[in-house]
Amino acid sequence: MSTRFENAELLAALWLLGAEGERLPTSHGILDKALKECMAVLPSALSASLSFGVTGVGLRCYELPDILLAAQEALLTTEPNPTYLSSLVTLDEDSARQIVLSYGLSTSKAREIGESLLASVKRTRAAVKQAAAA
């Protein structure tokens, strides 16, 4: 089973490689939903240690708060302050490539996974915006 720090480095690397410079969402269950939607394409090192449930505030990945905190503690992201809606991934691309390679992923496969996460995040944000406008 992966540790929260291993999950944090893998998630940060996937996001950096595929998310086109976007900030990593840290609030409103957006990343939770993206992870759940992308479970089939996530590396097993990450997906095997994630669990989900519907709570009073919607779908949640139970491990995500610890993963985000570990990412900040390891200086992989900026602080996931409760008043912020996102964090900046501070990894450089070379480090991200080395991380994904250590998990047996090619850089191109890691980019695809990161792009899938980003696409899911964008769909969720658009749905939230549309619901708020209705």
Image: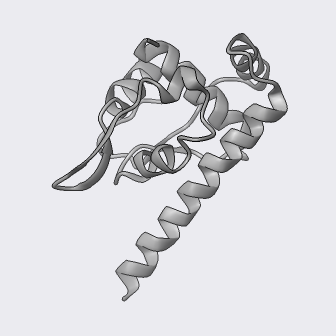
- Quadrant where the image shows the C terminus: bottom left
Placement of 125 over or under 107, stated as above or below: below
Q: Which residue is depicted at the point 47% across and 22% down?
A: 71
Placement of 109 over or under 98, stated as above or below: below
User: Residue 98 location, x and y as percent?
Assistant: 75, 14
Which of these two is toward me, 2 or 77? 2
Please say which color scheme the image uses. one colour
* Residue 103 left/right relative to 129: right
Placement of 56 over or under 78, stated as above or below: below
Q: Which residue is depicted at the point 56% across and 29% down?
A: 11
User: Residue 17 location, x and y as percent?
Assistant: 73, 35
User: Residue 112 location, x and y as percent?
Assistant: 75, 42
* Residue 92 left/right relative to 45: right
User: Residue 36 location, x and y as percent?
Assistant: 46, 46
Placement of 25 over or under 44, stated as above or below: below
* Residue 51 left/right relative to 48: left
